[in-house]
Image (cartoon, rainbow, N blue to C red):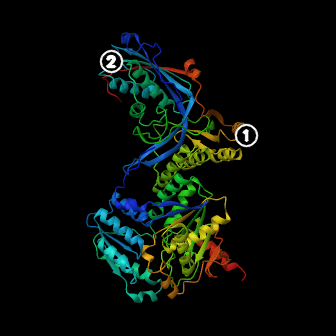
């Protein structure tokens, strides 16, 4: 399933006008944590940390790249350090381009909540890389964007690989396996399990999974492969639940079992979490009769628990007008150093 | 989403089971050599962890297929292997092990009369051998947690191929295959049932130790890798019942397996028929070649009193797991520990 149309420069005149009059535009969706995260064999016998992202196409970040041929300084808001790094890395990629930008400024517009595991920084970074590529009139492959995003922020979800379901080594920027073309039809009701808490993903210690857990991940990977191939939301829900429970040892969600119970009592299939965040999502099979009633009951159950709703994700394609209308929300500006500046 | 490729080495090919449908809701996981899974996993892990230096001798006590699996993997790794076996080791297996370069030591025949039988004598000899080598590694299939852990690969296959497993049936020896597979299955399918199949005069689930004819299942010593709390029920089969079921498996399904597979098939077939809505998988640990002169030979069966007609249609339920009662019995173990079950048994009024 494709969530987004190909991103185009807003002026629609690729490479026609002199570069200094152009800007580059990029967009990237949010996610709502993961369906599975752990350590997995990369095919050579080596275990790599990897994850399967649950995309959240109704929210996202838009980046606009304003190039400069003279600007060398680095100014901008400190929280956009990853964005600056991404822009620098992307500029380096295009330094052999006929008319490369030396530096520039990135403007981010985003409606993704920060610090709760919905991929705000990966989305900013991905949108930035796409904006710089767009300015240069270059189309980077999804895998290449993924590699640059990981270089820029050390670990990154796989929202840039939006044409299939992948097991993504989020610290290596590698696709370990394509599980299928799209997720089965489902509805996910998301909430913030710890309203007010913020997770610093860079400061988070990586989970030290033991041998037994490594075996469980091997099994969960196979089960998810089947769930995606056969559109089996029930099995997908079991996999996500197992992954969420293992993660309780590393970054516990206070109400996980209560939320799971709420979900299963109302005809749901399981619970997924942001393994480095605070959001959790109750998973429903969209084809199941009475799913709307179950979702409604869970929405009020979540509110009764005093938790904050974060998303209602369907696997229907995202509304295309949303992107066309632009995303409202947090705006920030970062100035970017020249392409020759060292990447942090 | 990926293409099929060849196996890297023979042991990789040997460890993969074939999943074969035996009924509307029954599949067999048919292994050429199931013990290859823990043998390969343990030795490769030891090598990765730096426990196998170039001069390290691998030593293990076994008379059966685990030794064969180790010997095959030792060929790939170019390591010396010493196996301590019963005096009664099968001559063809002995020759095959020798051809693979393994040294086979047999304990004296008199050891059977001592406490713990041959198994205790083998462990004693093993320690003597280890003391004589500067560097040795023992896979310890009965206590090494990597034995059950290695079976994640089976749970992986079952989940990818079937998605749902409501009941897993299999013979129990070291505890590795059943405990490992069902633990990993339950990480996704917590309600999956586990039915262990044991044989008379095996101490695993409460019988008193004694001579056992049926090979490949049952034990004289309690292995640390057996986690009793995983089992919903336990069945005991005699050699005769297991042999007859092994032949039926061959005659009806063209599956040429060993007698521990036959015993498990007997139980799984009965359970699957009584639970048509549940998907059942039965573990079948090895093939029939080693038993061609015995289980697959009617004259031998006749001479040893095993040609007694078809196996029973159903088990006799027992309230006391310590008492054998006929050729096929079943006990509701209910995921309790060994001590819990034995304590409950002792308080029951006869």
Res. A98 image quadrant = top left
- The answer for which chain carries disc 2 is A
Q: CA distance from mark 2 to mark 1?
A: 56 Å
x, y percent for residue A308 = 65, 34
Q: Nearer the viewer, residue A312 or B90?
A: B90
- The residue located at (61%, 56%) in the rendering is B190
Determine crowd level at label 2: few under 14, some 14-19, many 20+ residues with C-alpha closer than 10 A. Answer: many
Res. A96 image quadrant = top left
Residue at mark 2: A100
Res. B135 image quadrant = bottom left
x, y percent for residue A13 = 42, 12
Q: Nearer the viewer, residue A19 or B137?
A: A19
Q: Nearer the viewer, residue A284 or A332?
A: A284
* Residue A90 visible at all: yes
Quadrant that contains the C terminus of chain A: top left
* Residue A78 visible at all: no
SS type, badge 1: loop
Residue at mark 1: A290
The answer to whether B152 is drawn above or below residue B237 in the figure is: above
| CB contact under 8 Å: marks 2 and 1 | no
In this rendering, position of residue A160 left or right of residue B75: right
Determine crowd level at label 1: few under 14, some 14-19, many 20+ residues with C-alpha closer than 10 A. Answer: few
- The residue located at (43%, 31%) in the rendering is A142
Q: Earlier in the sequence, mark 2 or mark 1?
A: 2
Q: Nearer the viewer, mark 2 or mark 1?
A: 1
The answer to whether B101 is drawn above or below residue A95 in the figure is: below
SS type, badge 2: loop
x, y percent for residue B341 = 63, 73
- The answer for which chain carries disc 1 is A
x, y percent for residue A266 = 71, 44
């Amino acid at each position: 399933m494709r969530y987004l149309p190909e991103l185009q420069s807003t002026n629609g005149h690729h490479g026609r006008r002199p570069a200094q009059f152009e800007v580059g535009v990029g967009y990237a969706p949010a996610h709502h944590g993961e369906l599975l995260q752990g350590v997995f064999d990369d095919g050579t016998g080596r275990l790599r940390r990897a994850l399967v992202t649950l995309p959240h196409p109704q929210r996202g970040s838009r980046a606009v790249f304003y190039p400069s041929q003279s600007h060398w300084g680095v100014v901008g808001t400190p929280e956009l350090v990853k964005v600056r790094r991404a822009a620098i890395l992307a500029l380096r990629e295009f330094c052999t381009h006929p008319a490369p930008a030396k530096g520039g400024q990135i403007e981010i517009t985003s409606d993704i909540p920060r610090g709760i595991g919905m991929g705000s920084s990966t989305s900013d970074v991905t949108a930035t890389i796409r904006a710089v590529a767009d300015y240069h009139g270059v189309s980077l492959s999804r895998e290449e964007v993924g590699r640059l995003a990981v270089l820029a922020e050390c670990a990154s979800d796989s929202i840039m690989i939006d044409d299939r379901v992948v097991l993504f080594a989020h610290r290596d920027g590698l696709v370990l396996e394509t599980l299928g073309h799209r997720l089965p039809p489902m509805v996910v009701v998301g909430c913030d399990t710890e309203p007010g808490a913020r997770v610093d993903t860079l400061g988070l210690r990586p989970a030290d999974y033991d041998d037994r857990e490594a075996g469980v991940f091997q099994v969960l990977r196979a089960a998810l492969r089947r769930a995606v191939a056969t559109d089996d939301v029930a099995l997908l829900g079991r996999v996500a639940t197992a992954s969420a429970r293992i993660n309780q040892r590393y970054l516990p969600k206070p109400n996980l079992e209560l939320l799971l119970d709420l979900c299963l009592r109302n005809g749901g299939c399981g619970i997924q979490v942001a393994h480095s965040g605070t959001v959790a999502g109750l998973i429903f099979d969209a084809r199941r009769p009475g799913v709307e009633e179950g979702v409604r009951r869970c929405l009020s159950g979540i509110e009764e628990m005093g938790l904050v709703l974060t998303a209602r994700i369907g696997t229907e394609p995202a509304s295309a007008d949303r992107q066309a209308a632009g995303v409202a929300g947090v705006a920030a500006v970062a100035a970017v150093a020249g392409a020759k500046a060292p990447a942090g | 989403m990926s293409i099929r490729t060849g196996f890297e080495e023979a042991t990789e090919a040997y460890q993969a089971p074939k999943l074969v449908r035996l009924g509307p809701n029954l599949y067999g996981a048919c292994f050429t050599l199931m013990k290859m899974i823990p043998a390969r996993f343990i030795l490769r892990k030891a090598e990765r962890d730096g426990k196998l230096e170039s001069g390290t001798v691998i030593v293990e006590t076994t008379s059966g297929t685990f030794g064969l699996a180790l010997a095959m993997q030792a060929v790939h790794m170019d390591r010396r292997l010493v196996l301590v076996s019963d005096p009664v080791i099968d001559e063809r297996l002995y020759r095959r092990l020798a051809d693979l370069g393994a040294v086979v030591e047999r304990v004296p025949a008199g050891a059977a009369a001592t406490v713990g039988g041959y198994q205790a004598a083998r462990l004693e000899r093993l320690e003597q051998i280890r003391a004589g080598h500067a560097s040795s590694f023992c896979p310890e299939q009965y206590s090494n947690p990597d034995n059950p852990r290695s079976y994640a690969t089976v749970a992986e296959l079952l989940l990818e191929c079937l998605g749902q497993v409501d009941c897993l049936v299999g013979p129990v020896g070291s505890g590795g295959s059943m405990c490992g597979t069902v633990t990993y299955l339950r990480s996704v399918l917590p309600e999956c049932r586990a039915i262990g199949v044991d044989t008379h005069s095996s101490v695993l689930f409460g019988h008193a130790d004694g001579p056992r004819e049926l090979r490949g299942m049952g034990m004289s010593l309690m292995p640390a890798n057996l986690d009793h709390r995983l089992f919903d029920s336990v069945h005991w089969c005699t050699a005769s019942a297991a042999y007859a079921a092994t032949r039926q498996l061959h005659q009806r399904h063209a599956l040429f397996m060993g007698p521990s597979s036959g015993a498990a098939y007997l139980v799984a077939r009965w359970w699957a028929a009584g639970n048509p809505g549940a998907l059942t998988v039965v573990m079948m640990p090895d093939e029939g070649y080693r038993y061609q002169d015995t289980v697959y030979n009617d004259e031998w069966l006749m001479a040893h009193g095993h040609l007694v007609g078809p196996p029973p249609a159903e088990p006799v339920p027992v309230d006391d797991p310590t008492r054998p009662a006929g050729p096929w019995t079943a006990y509701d173990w209910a995921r309790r520990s060994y001590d819990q079950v034995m304590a409950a048994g002792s308080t029951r009024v006869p």
